[in-house]
Amino acid sequence: MPEDMLLYMRKAVYGCALLLLGSLPAGADDSKAARTPPNWTGSFLARVEALALLQTLNSELLSNSSATLTLEHWCELHRLASPPRIVAERVPDVDKAPSPEQRRELDVTPAEPVRYRRVRLLCGPIVLSEADNWYVPARLTPEMNRLLDTTDVPFGRVVQSLQFRRRTLSSTALWHPLPEGWEMSASAADVGAAALRMPPKLLEHRAILSLPDGTPFSEVVETYTANVLAFPAPP
């Protein structure tokens, strides 16, 4: 390939990466082992593709009120399981008291009951996310509270009829596909081509769910695992 054509292609890929970097910030716990296929190499192009996919998922999660439905669409689109249905797996016998800050965000008094629920969201056999959920039972219907107490139905599906709104408090990238200073490397080859090793968790979102009148009823912290990329790398 002519040298000028190779240089042009390299600049084009670098340009795409710069556009895709957007607002990704930084950080990393262990969940079920990620099933990232071996053909996700550590090449520069594979890292750009991983970055683009994470940016796409991140923007879809931020623009939709239900993380459950967003993950279900992602699962179907990338053929992670058949049928591509999200199932919640409640983690039993765990409890976390809400912090004073969380009580302020939920607009509850120090004595008002706030319940805690921890679930894993699975598509087929793989865990796509883990969620810590603090909610105000007095602001839900008795049937909703019964389902949350006795079943594994995802929280978003249980409260869907409330037509709730979601306000993101923070969105944090726990992994950067491209290493720091990649844009100053002499060539894309300097990034390395070993197998792409992803940490167990890639994204974290913290959000408040509110009723249509603005009354908050839930705070959720969602952590998205490397299994969101558990499909073959783009050819």
Image: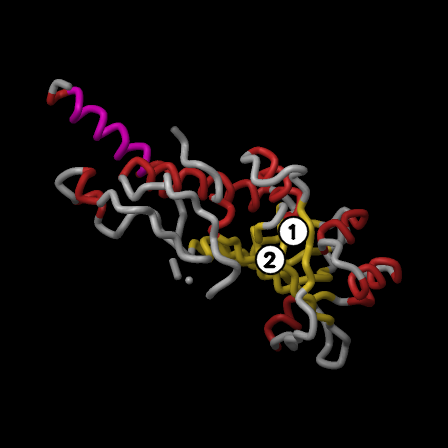
Q: On the rendered structure, is 12 left or right of 174?
A: left
Q: Of marks 2 and 1, which one's residue comes earlier in the chain?
A: 1
Colour scheme in the image? secondary structure
The quarter holding residue 101 reads bottom right
Q: Residues within 10 Å of mark 2 (few under 14, many from 20)?
A: some
Which residue corresponds to mark 1?
166
* Above or below for 98 versus 64: below
Asked if labels 1 and 2 touch by Cβ distance under 8 angstroms, the answer is yes
For residue 106, say whether it is visible: no
Q: In the rendering, which numbered label is found on residue 205?
A: none
Q: On the rendered structure, is 16 left or right of 139?
A: left
Q: On the rendered structure, is 220 left or right of 43?
A: right
For residue 185, say whether it is visible: yes
Name the one closer to the observer, 71 or 89.
Answer: 89
Q: Give how far across and how far down residue 108 sits, in percent.
A: 72, 72
Which stretch is magenta? 5-17
The quarter holding residue 155 reads bottom right
